[in-house]
Amino acid sequence: MKTHYALTRLSLLTAGLLCAGAAFASTATPGELKVGMEITYPPFESYDANKNVVGSDPDLARSLAKAMGAKASFVDTKFPNLINGLNAGHYDAIISGMYITPERQAQARTIPYANTGAAIMVPKGSDLNPQVPEDLCGLKIGLEQGTTWSGKFNELSRDYCVPNNKGAITVQEFPSAPEVTQALLSKNVQAQVEIAGAAHMIAQRTNGRVVVTSHKLVYPQTLGIYVKKDAEDTYQALVKALAESKANGEYAAMLKTYDLEPVSE
């Protein structure tokens, strides 16, 4: 009886170790899920007063890491360099408010995790009240470098604004969202376009010096987790971890906290 009990315990221990080993094998560093993100992008990711990484993406990353039997760590990387850093092996995945686009999918695999869109902002007291992209004709707008909107606004300018004699849209890109806001407050640009959640956070943090003028999401798109194309184990582990996060309610809590929409199943 004792022998049978001992063998049962040994079998359970071995199975547990094998499961842990499988989870750890799915990341470059055993027991650690390294996530690339630009940590200047509230409410998606930012540092709090104590230098802790907070926001929707860190919350999701920690939930996924827990499901994988690992601990999440974050590698602060400029947004335009994130995919290059992923493919260079600097981290296991990107979770950084990054839309899924065909161009990005050509460079890495994606797992959709939430839907959102952009918002338009102007300085408080501005004579401008742009609510839809077409209202930006003839204006100089600021965007964070590396976003998908630059091409969309250039296309809108070429195909709609100019032919209809409404003036071209001048797009100016900046290294980070706070730098765009500073340019807006300094009147170097007339409007800022930013992901909706971040836009409302910016309005709050500037104490109302910047206001959101759009009422509907601009260019709604899907946010994705990015994984190297040849990292099959990591990809499958993250897919399973996201399913577990949905099952245990952590995913739904994250969406509710940060006013994001779930992706279609």
Image (tube, helix red, strand yellow):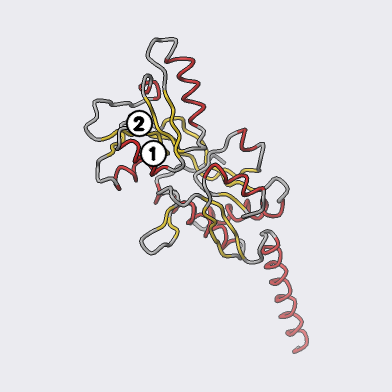
- Against 193, residue 155 (above or below) is above
Contact flag, marks 1 and 2 (Cβ < 8 Å): yes
Alpha-carbon distance for marks 1 and 2? 8 Å
What secondary structure is marked by label 1? helix
Q: Nearer the viewer, residue 235 or 251?
A: 235
- Please give the residue where the numbered disc 1 appears in the rendered image: 180
**Residue that appears at 49% across and 26% down:** 152
- Against 164, residue 226 (above or below) is below
Residue 125 placement, left or right of 215:
left
**Residue that appears at 63% across and 66% down:** 31
| Residue 203 locus on image (x, y percent) | 30, 42
**Residue that appears at 75% across and 89% down:** 2
What secondary structure is marked by label 2? loop
- Please give the residue where the numbered disc 2 appears in the rendered image: 189
Q: Extreme left residue here? A: 125
Three-letter amino acid code at disc 2?
A: Val
| Residue 226 locus on image (x, y percent) | 60, 46
Quadrant hosting residue 33? bottom right
Q: Which of 66 and 170 is in front in this view?
A: 170
Three-letter amino acid code at disc 1?
A: Val
What is the quadrant of the N terminus in the image? bottom right
Residue 125 placement, left or right of 131:
left
| Residue 127 locus on image (x, y percent) | 24, 25
What is the quadrant of the C terminus in the image? top right
Query: How many numbered callouts?
Result: 2
Q: Residue 137 carries which label?
A: none
